[in-house]
């Protein structure tokens, strides 16, 4: 099993609507379940602890290959385009268990 965790910093304009953006991104990313083969779980949350990272994405995949296919899947790329317009920073961690 592969875990994929991405954390973003919202740009100044997006920070004003962080709650709404989080709900929207949660819906968008959840829509990938059953669409992207090997994607087993996905969730989005807003960081309430402060700091530079505002939103986190957590995904579980069957395999590294499934994660690689997710990265280039057209449905994921469409969401990624939306995220890029809202963010100004990104951190990512991937690991296998």
Image (cartoon, helix red, strand yellow):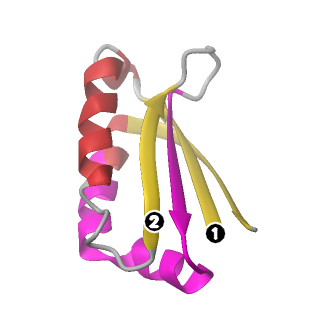
**How many residues crowd around disc 2 within 10 Å: few (fewer than 14), some, or many (20 or more)?**
some
Relative to 48, does residue 97 appear above or below in the rendering? Answer: below
The front one of 83 and 41 is 41
Relative to 24, does residue 3 appear above or below in the rendering? Answer: below
Q: Which part of the image, by quadrant, shows the C terminus?
A: bottom right
Decide whether residue 35 is among the magenta residues: no
Q: Residue 43 location, x and y as percent?
A: 43, 45
What element does badge 1 sit on? strand
> Is residue 31 at least partly visible in the picture?
yes
Give the labeled residue for mark 1: 2
Which residue sits at x=33%, y=74%?
36
The front one of 46 and 77 is 46
Which residue sits at x=43%, y=69%?
39
Q: Nearer the viewer, mark 2 or mark 1?
A: 2
Q: Mark 2 vs mark 1: which is more N-terminal?
A: 1
37 displayed left or right of 79: right
Decide whether residue 61 is among the magenta residues: yes
Which residue sits at x=35%, y=21%?
18
State how far apart marks 2 and 1 are (Cα): 10 Å
Q: Quadrant of residue 69?
A: bottom left
Q: Residue 94 location, x and y as percent?
A: 67, 62
Magenta segment boundaries in residue numbering? 54-82
Relative to 5, does residue 2 appear above or below in the rendering? Answer: below
Q: Residue 35 location, x and y as percent?
A: 26, 72
Give the labeled residue for mark 2: 40
Q: Residue 25 location, x and y as percent?
A: 30, 41
Q: Are marks 2 and 1 in contact (CB under 8 Å)?
A: no
The front one of 40 and 45 is 40
89 displayed left or right of 43: right
Dominant secondary-structure state across the stretch colored magenta: helix
- Marker disc for residue 95: none
Q: Quadrant of residue 75?
A: bottom left
């Amino acid at each position: 099993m592969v875990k994929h965790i991405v954390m973003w910093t919202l740009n100044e304009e997006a920070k004003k609507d962080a709650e709404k953006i989080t709900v929207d991104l949660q819906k968008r990313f959840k829509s990938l379940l059953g669409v992207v083969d090997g994607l087993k779980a996905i969730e989005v949350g807003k960081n309430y602890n402060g700091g530079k990272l505002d939103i986190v994405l957590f995904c579980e995949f069957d395999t590294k290959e499934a994660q690689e296919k997710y990265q280039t899947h057209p449905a994921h790329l469409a969401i990624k385009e939306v995220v890029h317009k809202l963010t100004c920073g990104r951190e990512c961690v991937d690991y296998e268990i």
